[in-house]
Structure formats: C-alpha cells, structure tokens
Image (spheres, rainbow, N blue to C red):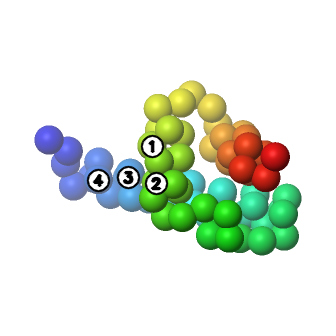
C-alpha cells in the first residue's frame, strides 16, 4: 500500500512530466500537448516514463518525435 507521501511524490512527478512534455511539444511543433494527445495517452506515457531509466527531458523529446514523425 502506498503512503500519502509516495502518492504525493508521484502526483508532483506527473505534473513535472506533463509540463516537460508540453514544453517539448510547443518547442518542436508550436502547439501544446493536447493538440496531439488525449489525457489517457499522456497518462500511459507517464507510466512508461516511470518504468524507464531515461531522463525526463530525453523521454519527452522522444515522445514528441514519435508523435509528429
């Protein structure tokens, strides 16, 4: 069972992830994240990020490139 602090840390990390991903989308495409992805897909990407060992900025850039390619 997760403690309140663990849930709180995951929530904070999710916010940072979405902000980072959104900044990458704007920088590369000129449009925000929700033009390309729905909230369910963004959550799936976040879960993939949690299971990866890739830095958040690298993961976000890879996501944008995969989506707009």
At 53% from the left and 47% from the top, the residue drawn is: 45
User: On screen, 67 above or below 34?
Assistant: above
Q: In the rendered view, does 38 fall on the left or right side of 3?
A: right
Image-quadrant location for residue 11: bottom left
Q: Quadrant of the N terminus?
A: top left
Q: How far apart, in angstroms, are the residues tagged by discs 4 and 3?
A: 5 Å
Q: In the rendered view, does 49 fall on the left or right side of 33?
A: left
Circles 4, 3 touching at the beta carbon (< 8 Å): yes
Image-quadrant location for residue 19: bottom right
Q: How far apart, in angstroms, are the residues tagged by discs 2 and 1?
A: 6 Å
**Residue lying at the far top of the rendered structure:** 53
In the picture of the structure, the residue carrying the numbered disc 1 is 47
Q: How far apart, in angstroms, are the residues tagged by discs 4 and 2?
A: 15 Å
At 47% from the left and 32% from the top, the residue drawn is: 51
In the picture of the structure, the residue carrying the numbered disc 4 is 7
In the picture of the structure, the residue carrying the numbered disc 2 is 43
Q: Nearer the viewer, residue 30 or 52?
A: 30
N-term-proximal mark, 3 vs 1: 3
Mark 4 is surrounded, within 10 Å at the Cα level, by few (under 14), some (14 to 19) or many (20 or more) other residues, namely few
Circles 4, 2 touching at the beta carbon (< 8 Å): no
At 49% from the left and 64% from the top, the residue drawn is: 39
N-term-proximal mark, 1 vs 4: 4
Q: How far apart, in angstroms, are the residues tagged by discs 2 and 3?
A: 16 Å
N-term-proximal mark, 2 vs 3: 3
Mark 3 is surrounded, within 10 Å at the Cα level, by few (under 14), some (14 to 19) or many (20 or more) other residues, namely few
Q: Nearer the viewer, residue 5 or 57?
A: 57
Q: Nearer the viewer, residue 22 or 1?
A: 22
In the picture of the structure, the residue carrying the numbered disc 3 is 9
Circles 3, 1 touching at the beta carbon (< 8 Å): no
Depth-wise, is mark 4 or mark 2 nearer the camera? 2
Circles 2, 1 touching at the beta carbon (< 8 Å): yes
The image shows residue 57 at horizontal and vertical percentages of 70, 46
């Amino acid at each position: 069972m997760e403690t309140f602090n663990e849930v709180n840390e995951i929530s904070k990390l999710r916010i940072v992830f979405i902000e980072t991903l959104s900044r990458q989308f704007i920088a590369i495409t000129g449009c925000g994240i929700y033009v390309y992805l729905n909230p369910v897909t963004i959550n799936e990407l976040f879960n993939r990020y949690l299971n990866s060992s890739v830095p958040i900025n690298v993961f976000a850039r890879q996501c944008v490139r995969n989506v707009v390619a």
